[in-house]
Each structure stands twice: as structure tokens, then as C-alpha cells.
Image: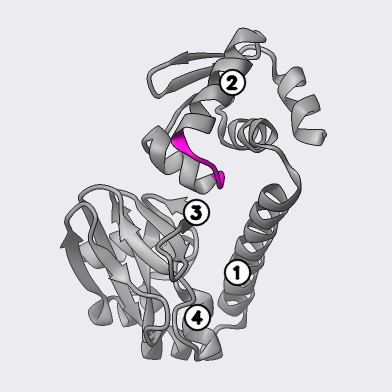
């Protein structure tokens, strides 16, 4: 099977499509490796397609004229970004920047839209994916607007934890601070406070959730 088809199938959006459909899209896909800190798309740039993360990690951000940055999301292998902007016919509403060496697949609009028209079930899956993404961004806005930093951190830890209540931060604490709308110093204080309360244990980027109920109470405040 073609490497591009295997890469497309690794994404939840394409996983259940037939090989015939993937074979029609794959020849149009462009793969490229980016260095750490490289800008993939810029806010306002025409959205001529969307991207799949094959390996590595990127951040989705918005920046103010003064240079202040708000990170909205981190995406890793199997994730995609840019679909809504492409289908809406507008420019990308955000910047996307690599956090490490990253390989992306660019899917042009034309073959993707042709499959949407010809396969209603595929269209429904795409709409569900975008609805989920919209809900995620709504939660981010809610967290930033009404929750204190410790509560934002508790929400993040609960959302990202594995089944055994363990997680490894996928990014540096400085980048996580940008996601939570705070400073690295404030994030460090919040981590220490939760650790002192016995809610978590921190070992570098590895965090153990020792008292999930306490974190849930904090997240609900």
C-alpha cells in the first residue's frame, strides 16, 4: 500500500475511508518536514487546504499587535488543522508553529471537497470532527475567562491524564503556560500548590494525579 495512504489512514478523519477513496486523495498530498519554531501558516493567509501531523507537534496560537501570544491548542501525530478555514473559504484565523521537528501532510482543497460531495458519510464525519474542535475551543474560552490559573491547570490535567492517572507534559512548562493564559512563574506556583496539597506529584514533565477528586472540585469552582 502507498505510504501516503498509510499516513492518511493514521488520522481519525480518514481511518474508515475505503482504499479507493484514499487512493484518489493521496496523489495530491504534499509531505514536508519542518524545523522547530517554523511557522507553518500565518493568520490571514489563504486556506488552500489543511494539514495532518505525521510526527512531531505544533501549536495553534493567536498573537496581538503588541506581540502577546495566546496558545489555543497543541496538536500531535494523527491530528489535523485548517479544515474549517478551508471549507469556509476564508483565511486561516490563527498562526501554526512547530514545537519540535515535525512532518506534515498538506491535503489540497480540491480532491478533499470532491470526496465530500461524493460521500455523504464522509461529510458527516468531517462535520463531527469540526464540531468537536469547536467544542474544545469553547472550553478554552470558558477556562480563560472565568477560571483561576489553578483551576485551569486542574482542568488540563484531568483532560489529558491517562487511565492510570499519569501524564507526561507534551510541551515545556513555558508553552503550557501560554496555553493556560498565564506566565511560566504563575504556572510553577500553581504546580507547587497542587503538589503541596497532595493533589499531584511532579517529576520534571511527568505528573501523577494523586487526588483526582480534589482536582475535580477545583475545576468546578
| Measured Cα–Cα span from mark 3 to mark 4 | 16 Å
- Residue 84 highlighted magenta (yes or no): no
**Does the rendering let one see residue 9?**
yes
Which residue is label 4 attached to? 85
Residue found 64% across the figure and 75% down from its top: 124
Q: Residues within 10 Å of mark 2 (few under 14, many from 20)?
A: some
Mark toward the start of the polypeptide (2 vs 1): 1
| Measured Cα–Cα span from mark 4 to mark 2 | 35 Å
Label 3: state its secondary structure. Answer: strand
- Which of the two discs, 4 and 2, sits closer to the camera? 4
Which residue is label 3 attached to? 73
- Describe residue 105's horizontal placement relative to residue 156 as left or right: left
Indicate which disc residue 130 carries.
1
Tags 3 and 4 touching, CB below 8 Å: no
Residue found 55% across the figure and 28% down from its top: 162
Q: Locate residue 178, reporting x and y percent.
A: 47, 47
Mark toward the start of the polypeptide (3 vs 4): 3
Label 2: state its secondary structure. Answer: loop
Residue range of the region highlighted in magenta in the rendering: 180-184
State the quadrant of the C terminus. Answer: top right
Which residue is label 2 attached to? 165
Q: Relative to 60, is 205 above or below?
A: above
Residue found 36% across the figure and 73% down from its top: 22
Amino acid at each position: 500500500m502507498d505510504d501516503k495512504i498509510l499516513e492518511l489512514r493514521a488520522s481519525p478523519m480518514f481511518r474508515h475511508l475505503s482504499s479507493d477513496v484514499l487512493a484518489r486523495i493521496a496523489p495530491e498530498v504534499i509531505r514536508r518536514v519542518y524545523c522547530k519554531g517554523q511557522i507553518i501558516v500565518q493568520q490571514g493567509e489563504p486556506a488552500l487546504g489543511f494539514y495532518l501531523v505525521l510526527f512531531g507537534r505544533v501549536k495553534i496560537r493567536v498573537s496581538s499587535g503588541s506581540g502577546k501570544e495566546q496558545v489555543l491548542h497543541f496538536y500531535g501525530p494523527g491530528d489535523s488543522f485548517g479544515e474549517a478555514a478551508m471549507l469556509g473559504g476564508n483565511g486561516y484565523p490563527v498562526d501554526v508553529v512547530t514545537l519540535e521537528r515535525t512532518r506534515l501532510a498538506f491535503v489540497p482543497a480540491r480532491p478533499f471537497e470532491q470526496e465530500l460531495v461524493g460521500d455523504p458519510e464522509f461529510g458527516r464525519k468531517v462535520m463531527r470532527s469540526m464540531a468537536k474542535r469547536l467544542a474544545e475551543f469553547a472550553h478554552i474560552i470558558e477556562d480563560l475567562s472565568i477560571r483561576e490559573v489553578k483551576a485551569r491547570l486542574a482542568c488540563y490535567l484531568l483532560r489529558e491524564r491517562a487511565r492510570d492517572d499519569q501524564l507526561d507534559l507534551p510541551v515545556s512548562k513555558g508553552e503550557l503556560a501560554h496555553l493556560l493564559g498565564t506566565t511560566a512563574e504563575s504556572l510553577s506556583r500553581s504546580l507547587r500548590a497542587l503538589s503541596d496539597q497532595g493533589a499531584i506529584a511532579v517529576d520534571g514533565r511527568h505528573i501523577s494525579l494523586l487526588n483526582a477528586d480534589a482536582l475535580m472540585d477545583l475545576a468546578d469552582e
